[in-house]
Image (cartoon, rainbow, N blue to C red):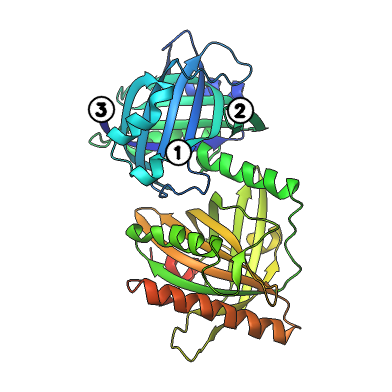
Amino acid sequence: MLEHRIEKRYFSDKSYEQVISILKKDFIYQKVSDKPYNQTIYFNTPNFDLPFELSLRARKYVKSKTGFILNKNSIWSIESKQGICSILGHHCKKKKEYAKFKVFKKIFKNYNVASNIISNLNPIFGTKYLREHFVHKKYPHLRLSLDSSITYYFFNKSKAIKLSDDLFVRLELKYPKTEKIPKSIFTSFGKQLNLNTPISKKDACHNLYNKYLFNKYNNIVPKHDLEIEAKLNISKTDQNIFIDFHRLISQNKLPNFKVYKNYPFVYETGKVQKFCISKNKYIRYTISKGNAGVTIKNNSQVVKDKYGYNCILIRQELPGNKKDIKNTKRFKELYRKKKYFLIENINNKNTYSFCIDRCSYKNHVLYQIEIEALAESSNKFSISSKVQDILTMLTHLFKNNTQIRSTTLTKQEWLMKFK
């Protein structure tokens, strides 16, 4: 089964009771099942090798609100979703088949998932929530699902371990790609509900799991006021570069570099970030559970290197506050997905983040690789050695991936291209 549809996702800071009261004006409740609680399992490899656009999952509805039940002999909806999350919604192609959970690898093979991915595929994250269904009174093709009482899990083998509960109510509007729905429909109840763009539930799992690992391993970001960062433009089909480079570093095949032993994980994150649209200042902030994390960057310099890469930026990076947001009128919002791991130089002990990210704004998408180091402006020797280490890694990448292109394009500059 292949379904083409548009999904618009939101969260509301209103209470569940307030949301229901507002929805009843334009939507009709539909009872779909006597099993209202949705259990979803997300699959991936231990190093999160799936491309950003592909989501593999299994879903099942149950009666019980408590716990997460995984019975491998029971029937689940085994699903593949291929799409892009953006501030306009989630545009996806979806396949699904009902089968016993234990044959999920066979189903994904039928969906043409790469065999090297399938061999390492396992349940990674899970969610459980109450899902209620509604249909618009005037436009019956417009469906709305309301998710509440959301709990996030990660899997240790087949055991679901709780990460956190969600404080907010989530709404998903779904309609066929061929269906024309007036914009006024979305804005009318959107204002009443104070709707905001959320990250996906899968990305929420990633973020919570990263926080869990940070706390477990007591990982601390070093004191810094400078960001030293190389940027490379890539395409959607170049995402294997990240997998290949991680394998190279893991196998100690790039002299003097290895995976950072104190934190040997691959991370994946998803965030909605807002950037000020100004040539004179760089302000970025991320909303997380009602709080804004603000970053200010300025005094940007491009390193002119002997190889002619000229893609290393050195920028001052400082924490900002809500006053900086209030004093800036124009912001644009993007959805950023990111994978990264940490690298250590075994001689000078410098550490680096090797990152691949995909940013989407409306229907526009940007793919980049970034190699980043943090430093203190007072330590000139540290800055110089980190630039040299980054150049070493860049040289390997250019030698083995002739299609990549050096760039100094920042997310802010990319967003300023669009009206």
The residue positioned 51% from the left and 60% from the top of the image is 246
The Cα–Cα distance between marks 3 and 2, rounded to whole angstroms, is 29 Å
Q: Is residue 7 left or right of residue 72?
A: left
- From the image, tell me which residue sits under label 3: 1
Q: Residues within 10 Å of mark 1 (few under 14, many from 20)?
A: many
- Disc ID at residue 121: 1
Mark 3 vs mark 2: give the one in front.
2
- Residue type at numbered disc 2: Ala
- From the image, tell me which residue sits under label 2: 160
Q: Is residue 174 left or right of residue 317?
A: left
Name the foreground residue: 8 vs 64. Answer: 64
- Vertical comparison of 132 with 242: above or below: above
The Cα–Cα distance between marks 1 and 3, rounded to whole angstroms, is 22 Å
- Disc ID at residue 236: none
**Picture coordinates of residue 130, whole percent (x, y):** 54, 20
Hey, which quadrant is residue 166 in on the image? top right
The residue positioned 70% from the left and 50% from the top of the image is 214
The residue positioned 64% from the left and 85% from the top of the image is 384
Label 1's element? loop
Q: Is residue 3 left or right of residue 315?
A: left
